[in-house]
Amino acid sequence: MKRKLFFPFFFFLLLSFSQVSIADGVPVSVNDLSSVEKIQWKEAYQAYGKNIAVDVNVYIPDVEAMPVIKVVKAPPISEPLNRELTEQYQKADKKDKVYSYKFESNDYWTYIEHACPPQYGKTKKDDDFKPGEMGIHVFDLFDYEYDQAYADNNPLTVRDAIQIAQNHLHDFLPDISAKVESIWIQGETYWKKSHKAIKKQGSYVINMRQELHGIPIMAEIRNAYSDQINWETNWESDLTGTICAYIFNDNSWILACRPYQENGIILNDIPVLPFDCVKEKLEQLILSGHIRWIHSVSLGYVQFETETPTEQILLPCWVTWCEYHSDGPASEQEYGLNDSGIMFDQNNPYFRPIIINAQTGMLFDPETSTQTDCLCPDLSLWQ
């Protein structure tokens, strides 16, 4: 009888220990986190006369381990296939007088333009943008249902557009997988004076983040830091790990891919802190007047630099993309008044990630201007 009772009691102790670890802020396996119910952060905060409403689902990748890995830029598509596709698209572009075709794969990106319709004219010949006379309405899709159509006069739903993008990504780069990060809608193109539509059908822009080991790359560490770091130095990782797709219809699309390639595993798995253990640091930034709006919270990879410029390290972190103001409560700027017309744009200085080390709970100071803070933190504690 004792032997029969031992195993259930033993597993009960293991389960209890796991639950206590998560509750007490002890780093645990990502397996323990993903086995917990989905987390929703829904709360309202009062900060300097502003009501900051947070309503996001916290994303945790469904994986069994969180390795720390080295990456480099992925090489171009193999030379024979590269040459074949380049010639194929050049012939198609020469033959078609309305739609554009282009293929190139190099050290910077793999770019495919397939039956791309003219944006500012009716044919390729007159597709010239005239500043002050033309404009195209682009806006973020904040809250949406996947099975509803949003783009002007476009029968595709959001789900359809995403599926088309994923299918073509798999066709050209079958080893690359990606998670949708944000969606833009491109509306009609108008003449400024008459507002008469040149292009009557709207389209989708699907912004995606590359996944490695099932974990999406949610940010570069430089994204989180001051503009001084971002603008003074060119770095190898610029936009690497991102995929952007323009979906016009079933047969018209653009795909721009800047993928990473794994270059070695530093640690096979590391424990991570539950979200509740890092949430307070985000709340402090809300209450101090720095964070005005939160778009997403994810447990994912962040790209850090190394002493070798061509090699990066991907480290699991808690990443919160948000509207962040360096001046805190003194900032009078609000979304809608920014220089950038869309929030989900890394050219918008107010849309930035707040990054927290998922192992230690350390916040990477968004106000730093020290270049060495872009280097990967010491990993010896986790070896």
Image (tube, helix red, strand yellow):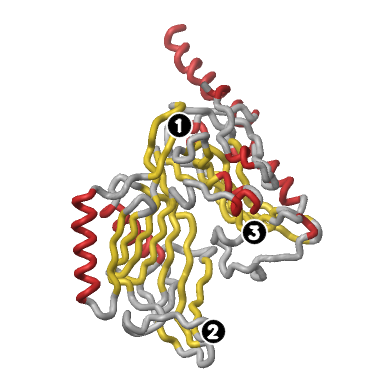
Residue that protrudes farthest toward the bottom in the picture: 194
How far, Cα to Cα, is label 2 from label 1? 50 Å
Badge 3 element: loop
Q: Is residue 268 visible?
A: yes
Say which mark, if any, is on residue 132: 2
Q: Position of residue 48 (x, y in %)?
A: 81, 58
Label 1 residue SS? loop
Q: Is residue 167 left or right of residue 222?
A: left
Foreground: 366 or 104?
A: 104
Nearer to us of marks 2 and 1 is: 2
Q: Marks 2/3: CA distance? A: 26 Å
Seen in the picture, residue 312 relative to 171 is either above or below; the reply is above
Question: Residue drawn 46% across and 26% down?
Answer: 267
Q: Which residue is mark 1?
A: 67
Residue 317 appears at what percent x and percent y?
55, 39
Disc 3 target residue? 350
Residue 306, x across and y down, in percent: 52, 35
- Residue 353 seen in the current view: no
Q: Nearer the viewer, mark 1 or mark 3?
A: 3
- Please say if 203 is above or below 271: below
Task: Select label 2 or label 3 by which is in front.
Answer: 2
Occupied quadrant, residue 345: bottom right
The residue positioned 63% from the left and 48% from the top of the image is: 225
**Residue 50 rendering spot, x and y as whole percentages:** 76, 61
